[in-house]
Amino acid sequence: MCFLFESFKGWKKYCEEKNQSLPETVIQYEIEQKNSSRELIYSGLLQAYGVMKDAVITGLKEDMTSRSGMINNGAKKVFNHPLSVLSPEFQKLISRALSAKEVNSCMGRVVAAPTAGASGILPGTMVTLQEIHQLSDEKIVEGLLVGAGIALIIEEKASLAGAVGGCQAETGSAAAMAAGAIVYCLGGTIDQVFNAVAITIQCMLGLVCDPVAGLVEVPCVVRNASAAAIAFSSAQIALANVSAVIPVDECVEAMGEIGASMESRYKETAMGGLAATLTGQEISKKVLIQDIEILPDETLPD
Amino acid sequence: MANKSSVFDMIGPIMIGPSSSHTAGVVRIARAAIRVLGGIPDEAEITFYNSFARTYEGHGSDRAIFGGLMDFKTDDERIKNALEIAKEKGLKYKFKSIGNSSVHHPNTIKLNLKKGERTVEVEGESLGGGVINIAEVDGFVANFSAQMHTLIIKAQDISGAIAFISSVIAQEKANIATMSVSRKGKNDLACHVIEMDSGINKITTQYLQSLPWIKELIYIPDIDL
Ligand code: SF4
């Protein structure tokens, strides 16, 4: 019987008892639960990573203007800006996360990881990690497997959907997946990987889902960039064995608890937060279709 | 086994943005509808309801619908330009928006499609994550996900019909996952909707179709294939 991804504590115990690596347990899970094979899993993830890389390139090359106009080639502007605030690598990281997410907003092809709203975070972080540390695609795929295991547990104990848990569930979970993958790919221990997840969740807790006009554009695109940065900051902290203090499973529980108590106007309904601002409402009026039929018999109570 | 998620739900699916309910789900509703019709339509009237009525343009659901009507898959990059492609092919279309229908799910689309002399009406709901429910076919309650293999049989409302149809399917060793019947009026037609885990052979559908009390049979294999 494979491990069912119900808690991080259990995942670690399972790995130690069976003497298996984190990605290996995820492979076993997929084989047993989904009747898959090792080859299919690897080729599927290599394909997904290929789509992520393409999205990063497409967003930096092609015109990325969304129909609302709110997204307008931001990734390219960041990539080409002459001033690097930190380092050229940081500049590339940010522009890549923006890039893949802009492709998503502009009806291009992406990998929902774990969701479409968070589809820039793993591409931005993994492509940049691979470049800086000269990692093979196979290593990145192992990192993605670790990320998938992390997401499976978050889904089980909290949620991955903005409509259920707010943006912490979407971009927060993606950042946690990326942080764990980074630490794993750089040779971190299981404790370090999970600590990176815990730290990342602590940084992303409470984030509401408040997309302007209900479109997956503002603030979603910039949140993909900040989540990518947080993934790296958490990995840096975790690799140095600086403890998150609150164990990762409890961090996930906190995320679930916060998500459950969030009012529905902060859960993808575009009724609160940035969506409810003056400008947010003006944009919404422009973007949304006003010329719609209202059925008369339903508006008047009998 | 309870429905455990796959690694490819966490890293995936590969899809066209911006959102699974506004693109992937919409494409799949249209893919199901053209299978009910039996081909790519010459004419389409598309009605967006409730939440979709306001948001479909901003989210690109108008393009997604045409992607599906032209049988593009959910990860096909042509979806972005599907409206232009459809226009070039001479597909006639009309969009309608209805803002406040309490009888419809928030994200509902009704498709009235015409190909040659044949017309169909299909109502689909985008439930999130790309998952759909085809709620109605030609006014009959249908409620199928199009994720499995689906048989829609319109037949005279005779006794024993359900048992007969299920025994024929059992011959094929196809496992019936769900089965429902809806009626329009008394002594009128009954519409059987059967979802199966695996596909069935053409000879079986032909046999069923040849029976005098069966008026129409539509077979829809997994729409993502
Ligand atoms: S704000 Fe909402 S729609 Fe945007 S990325 Fe976050 S969860 Fe997704």
Image (cartoon, grey):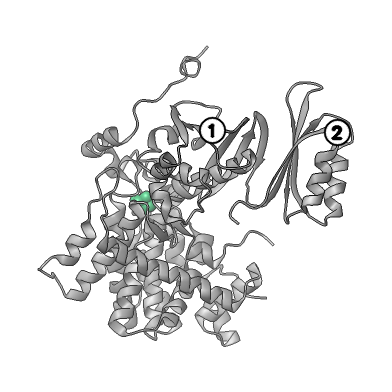
Q: Which x, y percent locates residue B210?
A: 83, 39
Q: Residues within 10 Å of mark 2 (few under 14, many from 20)?
A: few
Whether residue A227 appears in this view of the structure is no
| Residue denoted by label 1 | B110
Residue lying farthest to the left in this orientation = A83
User: Is residue A177 placed above or below A210 in the rendered structure?
Assistant: below
Looking at the image, which residue is at 49% across and 19% down? Answer: A298
Q: Position of residue B125 (x, y in %)?
A: 55, 39
Quadrant of the rendered structure where residue A246 is? bottom left
The amino acid marked with disc number 2 is Pro
Select label 2 or label 1 by which is in front.
2
Q: Which residue is mark 2?
A: B212
User: Which residue appears farthest toward the top when viewing the image?
Assistant: A302
Which one is nearer the viewer's eye here, A32 or A252?
Answer: A32
- What chain letter is assigned to the residue under label 2? B
Residue occupying the point 33% across, 57% down: A103
Q: Position of residue B167 (x, y in %)?
A: 87, 47
Question: Callout 1: few (<14), some (14-19), or many (20+) C-alpha neighbours within 10 Å?
Answer: many
- Position of residue B173 relative to residue B155, above or below, is below
Q: CA distance from mark 2 to mark 1?
A: 31 Å
Q: Position of residue A217 (x, y in %)?
A: 31, 49
Q: Secondary structure at mark 1?
A: strand
Disc number for residue A118: none
Q: Quadrant of the N terminus of chain A?
A: bottom right
Return the disc, 2 or 1, that comes first in the chain's sequence. Answer: 1
The residue nearer to you, when weighing A90 against B94, is: B94
Q: Secondary structure at mark 2?
A: loop
